[in-house]
Image (tube, rainbow, N blue to C red):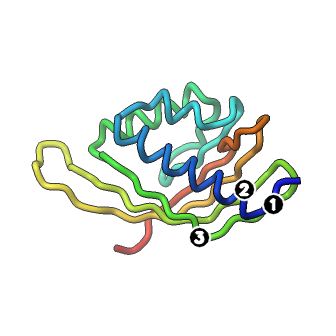
Amino acid sequence: MTMLSDVRSQIEANNEKFAEIFARGDATGIAGMYTEDAVILPPDAEIIRGRENIMGMWQMVMSSGIKGASLHTLEVETWGNVAKEIGTVTMTVQPPGSSETVTAKAKYVVIWKQEGDTWKMQTDIWNNSPS
């Protein structure tokens, strides 16, 4: 049985990988971090289902001027091969046509599912935090 601290470490490592892939602008790489049947619930948008649609959504996010994301895990809870993560994210945003960057903050909940030795995101929801 995997200990909670091990799961948290793996999730935090995945979040670092997410940030690196995001900074490269690799929506396909981001989508690969989700299960095949994943669901995301972005703010002010419809539910998005499946890795291909998730890839398209992340490509649109990157194209909108969000250049980076730094994730911070606040808590993790596990049930067998499923884990819940609550965290915060700080995004670096460069609005189209601007040379200046600003930061935006959000909070999130991710349900992770273990597939073999890998933890992948199965459900992802977030919304904005006050600045």
Taking the image as shown, residue 34 lies to the left or right of residue 115, namely: left
Tag on residue 80? Answer: none
Residue that label 3 marks: 74
Q: Are marks 2 and 1 in contact (CB under 8 Å)?
A: yes
The number of callouts visible is 3
Q: What element carries label 3?
A: strand
State the image coordinates of residue 47 (x, y, percent, origin top left): 60, 43
Q: Do the residues labelled 3 and 2 touch (CB within 8 Å)?
A: no
Q: Is mark 1 on a helix, strand or loop?
A: loop
Q: In which quarter of the image is the C terminus?
A: bottom left
What residue type is disc 3 on?
Leu
Cα gap from disc 3 to disc 2, whole angstroms: 13 Å
Residue that label 2 marks: 7
Residue that label 1 marks: 3
Quadrant position of residue 97:
top left
Q: Which of 11 and 64 is in front in this view?
A: 11
Residue 115, placed above or below residue 76: above
Cα gap from disc 2 to disc 1, whole angstroms: 6 Å
What residue type is disc 1 on?
Met
